[in-house]
Amino acid sequence: MSAATTRSRTPDRLCAEAVDLAREAAEETAAPGVVGEHVGLVSEGDRVVTHLFECKEPGYRGWRWAVTVARASRAKIVTLDETVLLPGPDALLAPEWVPWSERLRPGDMGPGDLLPTEADDLRLEPGYTGEDEVPPNSALAAGAPSHDLAERVDAEDAELTDRAEAVSAGADSTGRGQIAALAEEMGMARPRVLSRYGLHAAADRWEEAFGAKTPMAQAAPASCVTCAFLMPVGGSLGQAFGVCANEFSPADGRVVSLAYGCGGHSEAAIMPKPPVPSAPVLDSVTADAFPLRPARDGGSVSPDTDEASADLGHS
């Protein structure tokens, strides 16, 4: 039988009337003045009632003090069961907990922080470990004749320079010691390397931060592929990215796309010539006489003289 079927729909009368007892228990658990008004009650079962009080504690908006009281069968005394603080329907709750591996963002790590990498990280794949068995038909298998010219030259050189004992001491019967030494010299001795997914994820981040679609690149005079401050990188990413070495560039020391660009481009660092100012214009503040028509005697008639003649003709 489920718990829902054992609960009584009608709360016990004596337990429902024990509001003062429930308030005293809530104030004893919390503090005076923190317990607010009685907001309701809930029947938890036969002779078991939970009284709800408003919580006035700062930072617990919408929470309620829940005090459960009970009464034994055929008893007239109500006893205290428990007192807890529970969220109400409109309570202010903390956000859902997120694991640190999903909550961590780029730039959150500080000095001394450690970020463990999962064994099945999609960004990584197994690299050279040196533990693989050499195939029996391989040229590196024990007892296999050496037909490679480079190996024969290396063996002869080892005999001439007294390196034969050192070479033999560094290799086991399968020759894996020589492979491990060669892999370490070539930088291949890492247990895991970036997978194709890891390379693409890194390229997407770099392209978004310092790519051709950024506002800086849109306003640049040229792209980084023609800039002298671009330092190339090795591997397959070198076909699309490089490292900026311009201290005045916003991408100094960052991996940038070859299509990125900024105002610090090496070929755009030519100072423009200062503009030549035009000749100064002198403005006169006095009125200049301007002839309207030539005079009869070959001279010119000023506006004042013409107006005077017109006035005499009408007088």
Image (spheres, rainbow, N blue to C red):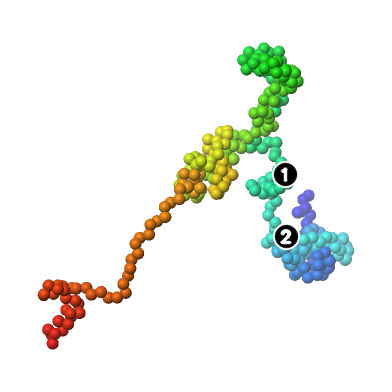
Q: Secondary structure at mark 1?
A: loop
- Amino acid type, residue under disc 2 in the picture: Pro
Image position of 119 with respect to 311: above or below: above
Q: Secondary structure at mark 2?
A: strand
- The label shown at residue 181 is none
Callout 2–callout 1 Cβ contact below 8 Å: no
5 or 200, which is in the foreground? Answer: 200
Residue 308 place in picture, x, y as percent: 17, 82
| Of the two numbered discs 2 and 1 in the rendering, the one whose residue sits closer to the viewer | 1
- Amino acid type, residue under disc 1 in the picture: Leu
The residue sitting at 79% across, 54% down in the picture is 6
Q: Is residue 120 left or right of residue 29?
A: left
Image position of 16 with respect to 269: above or below: below
- The image quadrant that residue 142 belongs to is top right
Count the marks.
2
- The image quadrant that residue 179 belongs to is top right
- Residue 208 can be seen, yes or no: no
Q: Which residue is mark 1?
A: 114
Residue 293 place in picture, x, y as percent: 15, 73
Q: Which residue is mark 2?
A: 87
Image position of 315 with respect to 194: above or below: below
